[in-house]
Image (cartoon, rainbow, N blue to C red):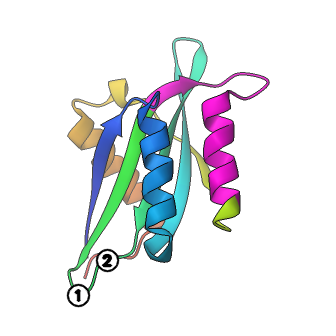
Amino acid sequence: MIQRFIELGEGYGDLFELIELAKTNHHRLHHAYVFQAPYQGSIRKSFAVAFKPAGSVPFIPIYICREGIEEKAPISGREQAFLEAMEELHITPVQLKVKHSSEYGSTVHHYQALIAILRLNHLLPPLS
């Protein structure tokens, strides 16, 4: 089973596109994720959704808005919109603390590490 991150952007307008993808493909929705990464004294959040394979194709796409939303109290409107959309879809986002992507040599390595973490925690199926 191939699993790959597809980056939409950094989470500003792109987060609303991610929400719309989840709503229009709710029948394929596998998991939703909120990744929290420390960065320069703050926490940067990434929002992602993983979909089940379409038909017989062994591919799990994981759409992500990477590290564009800073953690605040009270939570930002964008984060609130994501959480409300997932609640409407009866999905509880999995929240994970991870390293910031700048700690890796490239975003490819960052995404490989995230996939490994998700597999180890049984949040993605193993490779077949």
Of residues 77 and 114, the one drawn nearer to the viewer in this rendering: 77
Q: Residue 48, can we see it?
A: no
Question: Residue 70 lies in what quarter of the image?
Answer: top right
Q: Is residue 117 above or below residue 13?
A: below
| Residue 55 placement (x, y as % from top left) | 27, 85
- Name the secondary structure under disc 2: loop
Residue drawn 45% across the image and 31% down it: 11
Q: Magenta stretch: residue 76 in it?
A: yes
Q: Which mark is residue 68?
A: none
Q: Is residue 1 above or below residue 108?
A: below
Residue density around tag 1, few if under 14, some if 14–19, many if 20 or more, within 10 Å: few
Which residue is the site of mark 2? 53
Of residues 86 and 50, the one drawn nearer to the viewer in this rendering: 86
| Residue 27 placement (x, y as % from top left) | 48, 77
| Residue 37 placement (x, y as % from top left) | 52, 31
Q: Which range is magenta?
A: 67-87
| Residue 18 placement (x, y as % from top left) | 44, 47
Quarter of the rendering occupied by the N terminus: bottom left
Q: Residue 101, can we see it?
A: yes
Give the CA separation, mark 2 to mark 1.
7 Å
Residue drawn 79% across the image and 25% down it: 74
Residue drawn 28% across the image and 49% down it: 6
C-beta proximity under 8 Å, tags 2 and 1: yes
Q: Magenta stretch: residue 96 in it?
A: no
Residue density around tag 2, few if under 14, some if 14–19, many if 20 or more, within 10 Å: some
Q: Disc 2 residue type?
A: Pro
Left or right: where 125 falls relative to 69: left
Which residue is the site of mark 1? 56
Return the residue found at the far right. Answer: 74
